[in-house]
């Protein structure tokens, strides 16, 4: 399958997972949603590891890249959640759009990847469209208002946190492609999410365990999973969200193996367009017409990338 179709499928799956989470897991905590989207997804992807080389046969550079990726991925997730929880969305989410821009330099530094001038222009068009989609108070007719959130970087901690998240994602995405020199994308995606999924419960459980009073009884595994407040209290919804997120991860690595990292991530940013459509068609959100110009900018950017 062509990289463009895989990247668009990854974007659609990500937006679908977000919409399903909003619709069906609204009362789940951030920790629970993270476990669903990483741990349960990892378990669902595990059967795809059949035929994978034995882990102990993989070379040291593979484990070096993996050891660098895991803490960065977890740090990005914690920063992301803190930014959107404690700070205005309009001053935080726009900064995620900068990941493909960072990748232009990071991929050249780590992998020696270069993009054409036309391709770089396409990436910047997609980033500009993604920025406008997230800047809710910007007026399309007033160009000066598009840059309003940029000033927030000097006084809003959440803006700086999300910019750091975008930078970290630039590194993890590029490292993810470097690892594909040692393990095919069809195996690395499931393996990475399985390892990440096994790590996630430990990240969330350790602080709770440390804070637990000595001698206090821990809930049984059965209650933690299937009890009234358990993780699997809505098993079909959990499986649906996990399956969509797993599809996103699997197609992400298949696509990134076939094209420059910056191009793939720029196209994947079209998940924002799919998200806008879900918001209008499923959740009755308004403002679809006002997003058309930003959406057109993103589509134009993808077209430029494909033609480069």
Image (cartoon, rainbow, N blue to C red):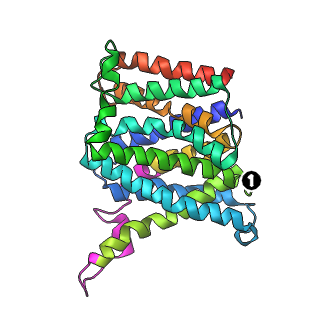
Q: Is residue 219 visible?
A: no
Q: Which quarter of the figure has residue 233?
A: bottom left
Q: Which residue in the rendered view is the most extreme toward the front?
A: 154
To which residue does mark 1 refer?
A: 181
Indicate whether residue 228 is drawn in magenta: yes
**In the image, what residue occupies the spot 44% across and 31% down?**
272
- Say above or below: 189 vs 70: above
Q: Position of residue 151 (x, y in %)?
A: 30, 33
Quadrant that contains the N terminus: top right
Q: Position of residue 249 (x, y in %)?
A: 57, 47
Q: Is residue 106 toward the left or the right of residue 294 in the image?
A: right
Q: Is residue 16 visible?
A: yes
Q: Is residue 267 toward the left or the right of residue 221 in the image?
A: right
**In the image, what residue occupies the spot 32% across and 19% down?**
144
Q: Which residues are magenta?
A: 211-240
- Say above or below: 227 vs 298: below
Q: Which quarter of the figure has residue 288?
A: top left
């Amino acid at each position: 399958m062509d990289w463009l179709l895989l990247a668009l499928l990854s974007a659609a799956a990500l937006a679908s997972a977000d919409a399903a989470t909003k619709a069906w897991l609204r009362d789940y905590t951030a920790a629970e949603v993270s476990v669903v989207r990483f741990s349960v997804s990892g378990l669902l992807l595990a059967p795809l590891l059949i035929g994978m080389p034995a882990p102990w046969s993989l070379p040291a550079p593979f484990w070096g890249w993996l050891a660098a990726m895991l803490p960065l991925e977890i740090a990005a997730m914690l920063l992301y959640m803190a930014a959107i929880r404690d700070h205005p969305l309009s001053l935080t989410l726009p900064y995620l759009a900068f990941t493909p821009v960072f990748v232009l330099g990071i991929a050249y530094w780590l992998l020696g990847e270069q993009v054409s001038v036309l391709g770089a222009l396409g990436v910047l068009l997609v980033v500009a469209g993604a920025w406008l989609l997230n800047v809710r108070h910007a007026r399309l007719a007033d160009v000066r208002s598009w840059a309003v959130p940029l000033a927030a970087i000097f006084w809003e901690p959440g803006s700086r946190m999300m910019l750091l998240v975008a930078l970290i994602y630039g590194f993890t995405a590029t490292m993810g492609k470097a690892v594909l020199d040692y393990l095919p994308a069809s195996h690395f995606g499931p393996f990475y999410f399985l390892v990440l999924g096994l790590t996630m419960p430990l990240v969330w459980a350790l602080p709770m365990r440390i804070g637990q009073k000595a001698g206090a009884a821990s809930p049984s595994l059965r209650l933690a999973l299937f009890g009234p407040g358990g993780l699997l209290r809505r098993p079909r919804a959990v499986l649906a969200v996990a399956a969509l997120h797993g599809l996103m991860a699997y197609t992400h690595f298949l696509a990134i193996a076939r094209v420059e990292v910056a191009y793939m991530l720029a196209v994947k940013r079209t998940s924002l367009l799919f998200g806008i459509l879900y918001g209008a068609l499923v959740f009755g959100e308004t403002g679809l017409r006002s997003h058309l110009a930003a959406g057109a900018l993103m589509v134009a950017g993808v077209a430029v990338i494909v033609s480069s």
